[in-house]
Image (cartoon, grey):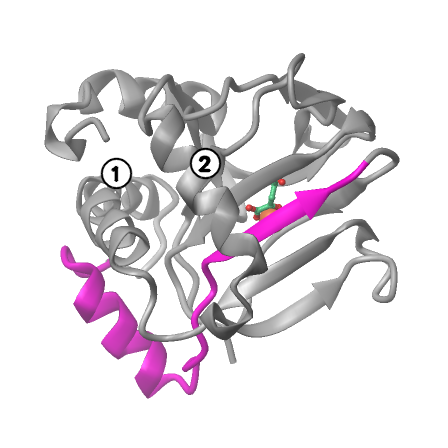
Amino acid sequence: MVAIESLNWYKIQESLDEKGYAHIPALLSIEECNKLAAYYTQENLYRSVINMQRYRFGKGEYKYFRYPLPSGIQKLRETIYSPLAVIANEWMNKLSLDIQFPLTHQQLIAHCHRAGQLRPTPLILRYESGGFNTLHQDLYGDVYFPFQVVFALSQQGTDYEGGELVFTEQIPRAQSKAMIMRPNQGDAIIFTTNFRPVKGTRGYYRAAMKHGVSEVKSGIRHALGIIFHDAT
Ligand SMILES: O=C(O)CCC(=O)C(=O)O
Ligand SMILES: [Fe+2]
């Protein structure tokens, strides 16, 4: 794994500010991806298993990890959080929101717990041919952090075809703009959970964003999602 502190956080912030998402190539090694994907079948690691079709969330399956999280995932969640908290606080200021996030993930979790959000949210997803994930937001209570991360654990073009990561951004008084990403195995994509600040003529306004996954045409696609807030 590339050290989180050594990433170009200036560039990451620039991309988040401009687009609401940032692409970090090769954050995980292929071996790390394969190890994480192999967690999928270790039933004791999870608190719940969601059949996406059953809830009409799409087609595929995902599993929420239970506490304690596997140590590598716990570490990723903590180390990526801190630089993002600084950016999140700037966003809250731009939007004149009276919210500031603590600089350590442990403090964010304490805050979630006080708000009754006790359940861990990191998840691993698996889609087969025909699988997809409808456009959504991962907000699980009143406390939510404005960024989350998805790690591509499979390689598009080799392990699967299709299955692009899709973002939409609501344009004021208009429809939504769609953006697609085709991360390679090991890449991370950081993106907005709820809304991002966009500069308008009278200061910043909120542009709501959603994410989803387009139809997987063939093969199997695994992804790891790290959401920083916990769930009710
Ligand atoms: O499968 C993906 O790439 C997206 C998963 C997702 O919705 C998430 O991590 O919140
Ligand atoms: Fe999601």
Q: Position of residue 119 (x, y in %)?
A: 45, 78
Q: Can residue 112 be seen?
A: yes
Q: Is residue 74 magenta?
A: no
Going from N to C along the chain, the mark reached first, 2 or 1, is 2
Q: Residue at x 43, y 45 (%)?
A: 36
In space, the residues marked 2 and 1 are separated at their CA atoms by 31 Å
Name the foreground residue: 37 vs 48: 37
**The quarter of the displayed image where residue 165 is located:** top right
Would you say 117 lies left or right of 83 here?
right
Q: Amino acid at mark 1?
A: Ile
Residue span colored magenta: 101-128
Q: Which residue is mark 1?
A: 87
Q: Secondary structure at mark 1?
A: helix
Q: Which residue is mark 2?
A: 34
Q: Amino acid at mark 2?
A: Asn
Q: Secondary structure at mark 2?
A: helix
Q: Position of residue 71 (x, y in %)?
A: 25, 59
**The quarter of the displayed image where residue 159 is located:** top right
Q: Can residue 208 be seen?
A: no
Would you say 189 lies left or right of 47 here?
left
Numbered circle sitting on residue 186: none
